[in-house]
Image (cartoon, rainbow, N blue to C red):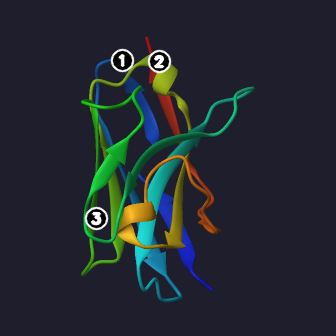
Amino acid sequence: QVQLVESGGGSVQAGGSLRLSCVVSRGPLYSPCMAWFRQAPGKEREGVAAIASDGRPSYAASVAGRFTISKDNAQNTLYLQMNSLKPEDAAMYYCAAENVASRWCALPRGFGYWGQGTQVTVSS
């Protein structure tokens, strides 16, 4: 069973930066499509960014140009660098993974493996 554990959340002022991490363990992902989602209170879960097994990233329009998704295959770790944070970026952020070919790794899509989340708070 694949396990995903997020870290790196916290509180930051608007305009600041945070880097989220997600360590993947306890199971193989042969063709991993990985992504970050977020959910704010009272709102639907939103896909933020995804990265295919070939390294190709995709972003939601709301974060494009401010957020960068990346991965370290040797460390089995997914990252989300978040710059120029806005109050509307505040949410619980979740890491997700699925085995799917690169051409199908783009938001929106379903994911079978999820982490527990890490909280991001942005003050104005």
Between the C-alphas of marks 1 and 2, the distance is 6 Å
Residue that carries the numbered disc 2 in the rendered image: 87
Q: Residue at x 43, y 60 (%)?
A: 105
Q: Secondary structure at mark 3?
A: strand
Residue that carries the numbered disc 3 in the rendered image: 71
Residue type at numbered disc 3 = Lys
Q: Residue at x 36, y 67 (%)?
A: 102
Residue type at numbered disc 2 = Pro
Q: How crowded is the residue under tag 2: few (<14 C-alpha within 10 Å), some, or many (20+)? A: some
Mark earlier in primary sequence (3, 2): 3
Q: Secondary structure at mark 2?
A: helix
Q: Secondary structure at mark 1?
A: loop
Q: How many dots with numbers?
A: 3
Between the C-alphas of marks 3 and 2, the distance is 26 Å
* Left or right side of 68 for 40: right
Closer-to-camera residue (100/64): 100
The percent position of residue 116, horizontal first and vertical second, equals 63, 59
Closer-to-camera residue (106/116): 106
Residue placed farthest to the right in the image?
Answer: 42
Above or below, 7 against 15 in this view is below
Above or below, 17 against 93 in this view is above
Q: Residue at x 65, y 39 (%)?
A: 45
